[in-house]
């Protein structure tokens, strides 16, 4: 019931809110706080619900199907424009309420069997958090560049490719030179010592 209520609240914000999407929660003021709270309440609760009711189903190539689905869903341009914000809000509601939970469910059901897929999955899993941490400042710089220069899609595409590539490389460098060394140090310093004292 909680997931349903939170989902309805987030859907209402997406469809009838001032943005026509769920890109909110970046400050503690007014609409940003409301949108961010609804995002958190739904996504966290929906994740817990999925983990409790999850029963894997056999699906071949789950990683590839899920990857393709994410690419397709995120490649859809904004729908409706500034005069019909509700249209894009409905699309984003379909994504967060139906498509993304289904992708998580199917992805969790899949099993990687060949070495190539295993290596890709491990790499993506390893850089996921560093990438999450480092990409945001560069996205804002990219947005400002595109908007200030009034660039077309074709003109901004090389910058977008450089942004994606550079963010991945920076995330990998942070993983190898900071994240993993610090985690290894903390593990050896606290966890193993604590286990030895038991």
Image (cartoon, rainbow, N blue to C red):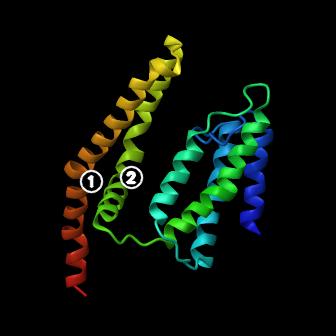
> Is residue 2 left or right of 164 when viewed as pictured?
right
Q: Residue furthest bottom?
A: 198
Mark 1, residue position: 179
Alpha carbon distance from label 2 to label 1: 10 Å
Which quarter of the figure is the C terminus placed in? bottom left
Q: Residues within 10 Å of mark 1 (few under 14, many from 20)?
A: some
* Residue contact between numbered discs 2 and 1, judged by CB atoms under 8 Å: yes
Quadrant for residue 50, please give it.
bottom right
Q: Residue at x 42, y 29 (%)?
A: 160
Q: Position of residue 148 (x, y in %)?
A: 51, 13
In the image, is residue 105 above or below residue 97? below
Q: Spot the residue most to the top.
A: 149
Q: Residue at x 51, y 52 (%)?
A: 68
Please tell me in which quadrant of the rendered image residue 21 appears.
Answer: top right
In the rendering, at what x and y percent does residue 139 appear?
A: 45, 31
Task: Pick whichever, 30 or 163, lies toward us.
Answer: 163
SS at badge 1: helix
Residue 150 in the image, given as x and y percentages of width and height? 53, 13
Judge whether 163 appears above or below 40 on screen.
above
Q: Dot 2 surroundings within 10 Å: few (below 14), some, or many (20 or more)?
A: few
N-term-proximal mark, 2 vs 1: 2
Q: Assign a secondary structure to mark 2.
A: helix
Q: Nearer the viewer, residue 178 or 195?
A: 178
The image shows residue 73, relative to residue 167, as above or below, that is below
Q: In the figure, 98 relative to 11: above or below?
A: below
According to the image, label 2 marks what residue?
A: 129
């Amino acid at each position: 019931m909680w997931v349903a209520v939170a989902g309805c609240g987030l859907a209402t914000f997406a469809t009838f809110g001032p943005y026509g999407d769920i890109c909110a929660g970046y400050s503690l003021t007014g609409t940003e706080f409301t949108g961010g709270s609804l995002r958190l309440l739904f996504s966290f609760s929906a994740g817990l619900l999925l983990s409790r009711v999850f029963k894997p189903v056999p699906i071949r190539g789950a990683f590839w199907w899920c990857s393709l689905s994410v690419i397709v869903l995120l490649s859809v341009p904004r729908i409706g424009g500034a005069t019909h914000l509700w249209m894009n809000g409905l699309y984003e509601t379909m994504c967060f309420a139906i498509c993304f939970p289904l992708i998580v469910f199917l992805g969790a059901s899949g099993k990687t069997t060949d070495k190539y897929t295993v290596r890709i999955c491990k790499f993506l899993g390893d850089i996921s958090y560093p990438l999450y941490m480092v990409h945001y400042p560069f996205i804002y710089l990219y947005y400002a560049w595109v908007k200030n220069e009034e660039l077309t899609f074709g003109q901004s595409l090389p910058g977008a490719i450089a942004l994606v590539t550079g963010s991945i490389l920076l995330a990998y460098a942070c993983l190898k030179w900071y994240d993993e060394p610090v985690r290894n140090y903390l593990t050896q310093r606290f966890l193993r010592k604590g286990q030895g004292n038991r």
